[in-house]
Amino acid sequence: MAGKSPQTSWIWNDGKFVAWEDAKLHVMSHVVHYGTSIFEGIRCYATPDGPAIFRLDAHMRRFHDSAQIYRMPLPYDQAALSAACGALVRRNEIDECYIRPIALRGVGTYGLDPTHSPVQTFIICWPWGTYLGDGALEAGVDVCVSSWQRAHPNTFPALAKAGGNYINAALIKMEAVADGYAEAIVLNSSGTVSEGSGQNLFLVREGVLITPAVDGSQLPGITRDSVLTIASDLGIPVREQAVPREALYIADELFFCGTAAEVTPIRSVDRITIGKGSAGPISLAMQKRFLDIVHGRTDDRHGWLTPVARGAKAAVG
Ligand SMILES: Cc1ncc(COP(=O)(O)O)c(C=O)c1O
């Protein structure tokens, strides 16, 4: 049984801070019935210069992209929402947290067309540790290939981070956990590798980093993009391509990456040991550089960190 979920004192709701327990929705909100929300997942890390939010601009760009795809008019531009994220972290007096901006369709008409249901925007933050379990970053995780597939392109738009998409992710995750795995890798409707339930995937073979090309079945992750940039910084060759399922079993190394999962090595797939059955050297090098950047232990050469105390001045609160 999972323990009590962590919470903080304040939630940002359409320009105001409300107490955690007062951020409520009506049961007839469109989102409750039809999954009409778009959201982001962002991490804020403790650094020697205070809390800093990782790749805030890229997350806010994707938030607005998701809204655009779903014809959801957002009343706040990227700068206002970025400022609100910083203000929320400051207000909650927290150094490290996960930040969840979400825009959803509230109470309006009850049919499928959401356009007459008002858009409500919230930003929540809370402390969230290692997503795939204690020790996962060091030891790696055991995963399976899911019996579920990702939706075909032009069904549920994978470039949008929309609430409804995650019903598929929940099926994938529940099956994996019920079968004794930490996570699952999912195939797309062509039968090649897509991603995990909530993270992207990299393989290493003969010193080359390989990741499934963006094919309309997976979320193009911001951590994935960061890994590609770090690989170029470290002089590791990269290929984005279609990845057949069996390439997983013969990889030298495998790792997941995502805001929640960070860079998590994979030590087996369907009980087939990957490499030496522990985190491989390229996975560990990527993980180290990633964690060094987010924790401010190395030069932020790409300008990925937004300090919370400076520069993130709130328009509200
Ligand atoms: C389905 C899915 N794929 C991949 C990712 C990784 O994306 P990011 O690195 O932007 O967090 C996420 C997490 O947001 C996700 O939900």
Image (cartoon, rainbow, N blue to C red):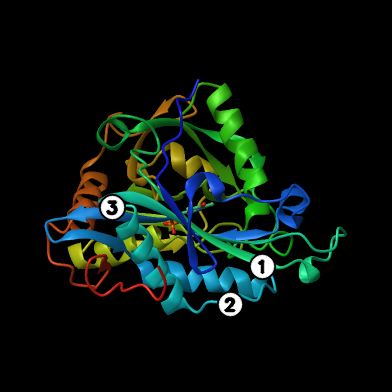
Residue receiving disc 1: 119
- The amino acid pointed to by label 3 is Glu
Residue receiving disc 3: 93
Q: Earlier in the sequence, mark 2 or mark 3?
A: 2
Q: Could one spot residue 27 in this view of the protein?
A: yes
In the rendered view, would you say 274 is above or below 196? above
- The amino acid pointed to by label 1 is Val
Label 1 packing within 10 angstroms: few (<14), some (14-19), many (20+): many
Q: Nearer the viewer, mark 3 or mark 1?
A: 3
Would you say 252 lies left or right of 39 here? left
Label 2 packing within 10 angstroms: few (<14), some (14-19), many (20+): few
Would you say 75 lies left or right of 201 here? right
Quarter of the image that includes the C terminus: bottom left
- The amino acid pointed to by label 2 is Pro
Foreground residue, 165 or 229? 165
Whether label 1 touches label 2, CB < 8 Å:
yes
- Residue 293: name its quadrant: bottom left
Would you say 60 lies left or right of 134 here? right
